[in-house]
Image (tube, helix red, strand yellow):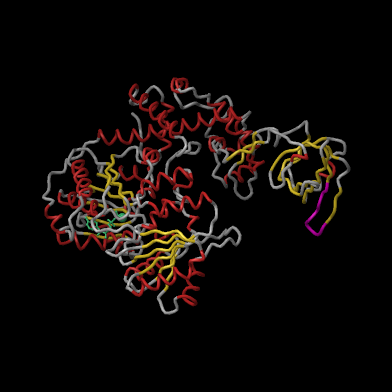
Amino acid sequence: MADLKTDVRYIKGIGEQRAKALAKLDIRTLRDLISWFPRRYEDRTKTCRIADLVPGETACVCAMVAAPPAVSHIRKGLDLVKVRAVDETGVLDVTFFNQSWLKNSLRTGESYVFCGKAEGNLLRRRMANPIAEPEGRREATGRIVPVYPLTVGVSQLVLSRSIRQGLDACADILPDALPDAVRREHQLCHIGFAYENIHFPSGGQALELARRRLAFEELFFFTLGLRRLRQRRETAEVKPFRPVDMGEFYGALPFTLTGAQRRCVEEALTDMASGRPMNRLCQGDVGSGKTMVAAACAFFCVKNGCQAALMAPTEILARQHYEGLAPLLEPLGIRCALLTGSHTAKEKRNLAAALAAGETDFIVGTHALITGGLEYRRLGLVVTDEQHRFGVGQRAALAGKGNHPHTLVMSATPIPRTLALILYGDLDVSVIDELPPGRRPVQTSFVDGSYHPRIYKFLRRLVGEGRQAYIVCPQVSESEEGGDGRKAVTEYAAKLREEVFPDLQVAYVHGKMKPREKDAVMAAFAARETDILVSTTVIEVGVDVPNAAVMVVENAERFGLSQLHQLRGRVGRGPWQSYCVLVSDNQNEETRRRLKIMTETSDGFKIAEEDLRLRGPGDFFGQRQHGLPGLRVADIGCDAQLLKEAQAAADALLARDPGLTGCPEAAERVKELFTGAAVTFS
Ligand code: ADP
Ligand code: MG
């Protein structure tokens, strides 16, 4: 029957009702359904004896119902079924809430498997609301059970039954996009086996085989897509930029570029003069001076008669770039403009018209620069700042804008090599491995909460010397998990104002504020109108306030190291000695070791590697999307070996069959994966 594009509601056993529920998870087609992979698994293959149950741990026991279940009506809306179950080692008291039908289905003298969290003590063990199934008819136990990501109104049971139906519906028609030769060469299992066992593993080994196959496949197609992007660029021809007297630009700078900056500029200029579109990543630690590299490239581009665009992840950062660069570039005859969301419709129209007429040479803004329907007269260069917030798809969309504009990507987050290989697999890389002279490393210390009085005294002293301070708290969140000491920014700021610094200017900023409010607070801080800024991580991205010389991070254990490093980069931008104080009461040894790394090094790469090693890649980007299309099974930190294998396989295939004419399914898959990116094989 059906192909994978079939709407789930036509699948036997699913129907309208369930299809509606599944739609909440964006599961619409058969393909969506069977690709909804479990987040983790619970091994319910083993049963233990009642005496071996450990309070607090989840386990399965097989036990016999010893007496008829007792039902009691506690109050309106709360019924309780109590059952006593026994085995040769002890007694287990089982209770169920609001499942009174169990009264009739649990029969005295018969054995059932109860699976749940054990409670009680060594003498009396209890389980509340376990899964209970007859020993002879096990469905939810007796195997490795998938645990799916859910949403309101869609339960594990609904999902796993729907997926069962889905797999049954397509068992015979599952198309395998992975070329068979590749599959055999790398000892990967068949597609049918893989899908069956990723959802319903027949055992641990089968699950591993399934996972390996699906992860390989993802990395393989992803690599093919990246290679294709690169190849398209290498075969595209653009008019080479001619040499320009860069002395005019360098002479206008208030400082001399560092050797590393110069090298990056030269590498980029060489690219742009090559006759092929540049696609380069400029990677440099916070404060290494990437903006000037971008400015040099923009200068070069404009002097070649083309327009340049600089795209920042936030409006405030865009404005800061504009305010920093326009005074430098305007005197050199470069007409600059800033596009933000706060323009009136008329201003926007005028901006767009000037851009289309070629009356603007250099435009700064957010990603509205590529998505905002703007037309450029001769777009020659697009620079994106803080790239990992954009992602591969956007990069590709951008490359499709105009006639192959040169692209320069600037990343502040030092990314571990394995990850960089994936994220930036289609880019050439320049590294700024040198800081501007005169920088003093930020002095970082790690203390517990008892140091607060001393910290406040220290802040007061620095503010007295004319400096400013950041205090960073973990994200304000609606679903605060219990009162575990997360300090909400607003409350903290109020407390500081009232109790600690009544005579100082304390402001706060967090992600739930409107962009305009946020901007206003940041602008006031940059203008030195406030002394202390209490904030969430919204300040993490690139805003430059050189006068800020100290940062206190509360509940520091809640941040990733790379994130702390990024945050810390907000201080130490001026000529003063700067400080970072990490505060944590967490006693976990691992956590303390992690935070201590921050006090020992200011090398972003080292920190990133440690971070990846200690926390795994899922956490590496925190809440942010990694922006990689199609990686659902592959784990970008742990599957480094598999990645190498998949890349080798992709390269070998492309060497044999550059157009993928022999495997149209594979070409089709890559195209789907990079939708919007216009990746095609021909
Ligand atoms: P990044 O974007 O890499 O974090 P920025 O481009 O914002 O860093 O530069 C950080 C600060 O260093 C800015 O205030 C900038 O003016 C200054 N700066 C950049 N290059 C130099 C240099 N070669 N010498 C001195 N100061 C520099
Ligand atoms: Mg920057």
Q: Which residues are magenta?
A: 74-82
- On the image, the x and y values in percent for residue 2 come to 56, 30
Position of 548 with respect to 179 (left or right) is: left
Q: Residue at x 33, y 25 (%)?
A: 658
* Residue drawn at x 43%, y 34% as measured from the top left: 640
> 101 or 327, which lies in front?
327
Please state which of residues 382 and 404 is positioned toward the viewer in this rendering: 382
Q: Is residue 34 above or below residue 470?
A: above
Is-magenta flag for residue 176? no
Quarter-wise, where is residue 457 in the image?
bottom left
In which of the image's four quarters is ligand 2 placed? bottom left
Numbered-mark total: 0
Residue 481 position, x and y percent, is 59, 57
In the rendered view, tell whether residue 654 sits above or below residue 603. above
Q: Quadrant of residue 647?
A: top left
**Does 81 lie within the magenta span?**
yes
Q: Position of residue 352 (x, y in %)?
A: 27, 57
The N terminus: image quadrant: top right
Q: Is residue 500 above or below residue 57?
A: below
Tell me: 625 left or right of 119.
Answer: left
- Left-right relation of 145 to 419: right
Instruction: Depth check: give the residue in front, 476 or 450.
Output: 450
Q: Is residue 88 left or right of residue 283?
A: right
